[in-house]
Image (cartoon, rainbow, N blue to C red):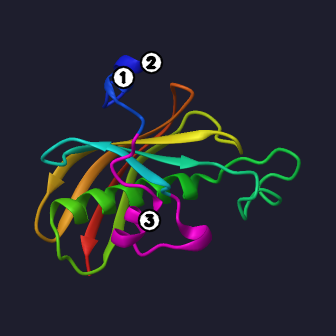
Amino acid sequence: MASDFFIDLDTIAFTPHMADEAAVARVNPQGGPMRQLDAVIWHDNPITMGLGIKQVRQDEFWVPYHVPGRPLMPGVLMIAACAQLGSYLYRTKVPNLPFVGFTRCTDTVFRGQVVPGDAFLILCKEIECGRRRFISAFQGVVNRKLVMETTITGMTF
């Protein structure tokens, strides 16, 4: 239900993106098949909420193996997509940080499936932000349906 989302998706312009793949790559170190964030669609100012996207493709490295004949995006990759959005937002809000990694993942619930062809939307809401760490809540959405939730703590190293 849209009313349960952190962000009212009806109020967001989905194009142009605030950060395309190249802009995300300049901030986040993940590359190749480990990049799970394709773009940042929107974030508020002062960067306490954000919306990212992962276009789930048929040629993803996991498709032939998780689950053969019925590929499902692994939950760990959904969490990685959330962590990458959180890191991007944190590094944008608090510039000139060293490496940011995630140290904790809690309250994770999977409520639906994500399959090739889906646009996996990642909604982020800041819970806490300091000079060395952040805590954010995330929601994963496909076709306006909540498919996962998690809370991630990230920290500078």
Badge 1 or badge 3: first in the primary sequence: 1
Depth check, front residue: 119 or 82: 119
Instruction: Find residue 4 and name its label.
Output: 1
Q: Earlier in the sequence, mark 3 or mark 2?
A: 2
Q: Position of residue 14 (x, y in %)?
A: 42, 35
Q: Is residue 145 left or right of residue 40?
A: right
Quadrant of res 138: top left
Q: Are marks 2 and 1 in contact (CB under 8 Å)?
A: yes
Mark 2 → mark 1, Cα distance in angstroms: 6 Å
SS assignment at label 1: helix
Question: At x 83% / y 59%, what residue is drawn?
Answer: 64
Residue visible at 88% across and 47% down?
A: 69
What mark, if any, has residue 1 been given in the picture? 2
Tell me the residue that label 3 is attached to: 22
Q: Quadrant of residue 8?
A: top left
Cα–Cα gap, marks 3 and 2: 32 Å
